[in-house]
Image: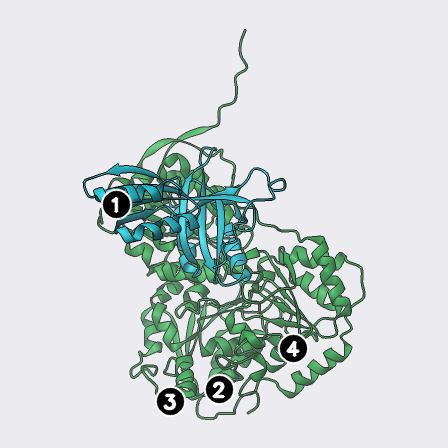
Amino acid sequence: MKRRIVTATVLNQSGVLNRVTCLFTKRHFNIESITVGHTETEGISKMTFVVSVEDDRQIEQLLKQLNKQIDVLKVSDITNQAIVARELALIKVLANGQTRAEINGIVEPFRALIIDLSRDTLIVQVTGDTEKIEAIIELLKPYGIKELSRTGVTAFARGSQKSVTDIKQYTLLK
Amino acid sequence: MKANVKAEPQEQRLTGAETLIHALKQEDVDVVFGYPGGAVLPIYDALYRNPIKHVLARHEQGAIHSAEGYARISGKPGVVIATSGPGATNLVTGITDAMMDSLPLVIFTGQVASGVIGTDAFQEADVTGVTMPITKHNYQVRDLKDLPRIVKEAFHIAKTGRPGPVLVDIPKDVSASVSDVSFDCPVHLPGFQPTKRPNLLQIKKLNEAIETAKKPVILAGAGVLHAKGSEQLRAVAEAKHIPVVHTLLGLGAFPAEHPLFLGMGGMHGCYAANMALYESDLLISVGARFDDRLTGNLKTFAPEATVAHIDIDPAEIGKNVATQIPIVADAKEAMLSLLDEQGTPALSEDWLQHLDGYKLEYPYWNKEVKQVISPQQLMKDIHLITQGEAIVTTDVGQHQMWAAQYYTFNEPHKWVTSGGLGTMGFGFPAAIGAQIAEPDKKVISIVGDGGFQMTSEEMILLKEMNLPVKVVIVNNGAMGMVRQWQEAFYEKRYSQSVFMTQPDFVKLAECYGVRGYQASNIDEARALLSEVLHDDEPVLIDCRVCPEENVFPMVAPGTGLHEMIGVRP
């Protein structure tokens, strides 16, 4: 199974998310995450899907089926482009006076933030690509994660595709 | 100074229901199929005052299958009106059927008033949600001012590109409310721009492939009929010396008596057609979608062939079969472009001879039966008596396959069947729609005894509307195809496939005011058919066919087209 990142520009009509997820279910595509939000143009929204597919034929079929939807304006598979992809996670970790400093030591190098404190927990907010989020979750696990909420990936292509050569390609081969 | 007075778009003060009727008239709708109910009362009231011919089916499923038959024969979108909740959900089978077979339908369903949507109100169902996966597109009208635009878009989407069903859900308060509405609303659908003309480089590539091909074959589907491209298909086949195989739904797109015609392919197709697909080195699919009933086991489907796939729906290309020459286009336009290409015909002389051998050696066969009617013979006789000029509609099952095998279709737009969804109960109401579309043509509904009982209540329409539809029941006292599969693959355990009790179909016809007959041997059937097929009244003939008869040849499930069984008696 390969992970692919697909974006779709859609008309912001009622039920459009339902329409798209319904299509995924009907055609037996496996979704890992979906994010949706407004774009710079009024009435147009952008969706980012992370999907796992078996082969290139399946991703081609997915793109074509998405394109067929009347409300869908443009579909791109940006997996192999130079892109920025970000995910946000909120992690509530058990923390007492002793471990608080330790956790802070983990949070800092990840450039994450502690955004809430209570007597025995704290909440970490972290943004970044999926690997980074997973790495910090792994590190925080031993302290005891009480609650975890992830947004799923949102992404788009970088402004310049050619001049950026040192960028890590977002292939996500699993 | 006086400013130039700009012409304001003309606005009229209308109710939602009146707006709908007005919009339908703008779309040249001359007949609607429907069934009233609480949530569509305003619409029916507007219909009372501004009549459009309305066909009052006796069940919403009957209405929508009639609309499908109408759409198939007239080429215009079939229009259906149903009330909310149960009315709307009764349409689901027909919507799915139209989606699978690419038939243009525009369906208007009533919805409970906007204020109570989502409260599980009386007769409320989330119809847009229910029909999302089975429509090409659907709408719920939130504001009366949007209605003219939505109706326009719905018709445009239903009939443009690959045809399909579009549903418009109208809350009761929207159809009852009054507002200034403007019909001046151009269709603007940036996300829906079907490609009609083919890419000429791809056409060139196909032409080159044809020139070097030794074993080319064209697989023609219903896309040819939708594009009205039969003549062009024939011209291509003749100019390039390529034999033609049909899908079930494509019957009639290429004349069956043409020397280049091989027959229908697929599960119950003929041996020559299937072997041509299997042995070909160039397979040109035109408006067909490689359904699994056509391909058999994909692993052994056309193993040697370069595949060229012409389809107006890009998503069909490469969906089931890997394609080397993809061409997104309307079938007619693609054929015209191909004809424009200069070039020599395919090197197919030996191939054509070879296939003729198959045609002669392995034709369809049937056993002679005396006491009861041979269903195959019955189909041949119907063809003979009607001189192939009738429109034939069927359900799904054995009778459908016999009709496809033995009724010879030489012209397009004579064949209405439920292919993709395989809907029992489709054929009879579809015949009603077909007869409404073509009042002067003979329409014969060939149905099974099982499927007919699913929608037989529509019989009353034959009397009510004076429709001369002839119903031929291929009565074997069972769900024949189910029984056949149980015989072949479930060691003759006939679980619930044989009807223990049957209605008296003759009396049933009579109670609906339709003449009914029963035929128990082929001579009786022949005599009856020649008598009634030429008169102008509806007739039902209950033909008692051989109950053990099976459809052959056959590609058993999981096997390839070259592994047909029952090729010979």
Q: Colour of chain B?
A: green
Badge 1 density bin: few <14, some 14–19, many ≥20, Cα 10 Å: few
Depth order, front residue of A90/A8: A90
Give the foreground label among 1 and 4. Answer: 1
Using the rendered view, name the quadrant where residue B449 is placed: bottom left
Label for residue B322?
none
**Label 2 is placed on what type of residue?**
Ser
Q: Are labels 2 and 4 on one chain?
A: yes
Give the foreground label among 2 and 4. Answer: 4
Chain bearing mark 4: B
Secondary element at image label 4: helix
Find the residue positioned furthest to the left. A119
Give the foreground label among 1 and 3. Answer: 1
Badge 4 density bin: few <14, some 14–19, many ≥20, Cα 10 Å: many
Please name the residue shown 59% across and 56% down the image: B312
Please name the residue shown 71% across and 71% down the image: B242
**Label 3 is placed on what type of residue?**
Lys
**Label 4 is placed on what type of residue?**
Ala
Label for residue B374?
2
Label for residue B492?
3
Mark 1 lies on residue: A99
Q: Are labels 3 and 2 on one chain?
A: yes
Secondary element at image label 1: helix
**Label 1 is placed on what type of residue?**
Thr
Q: Colour of chain A?
A: cyan
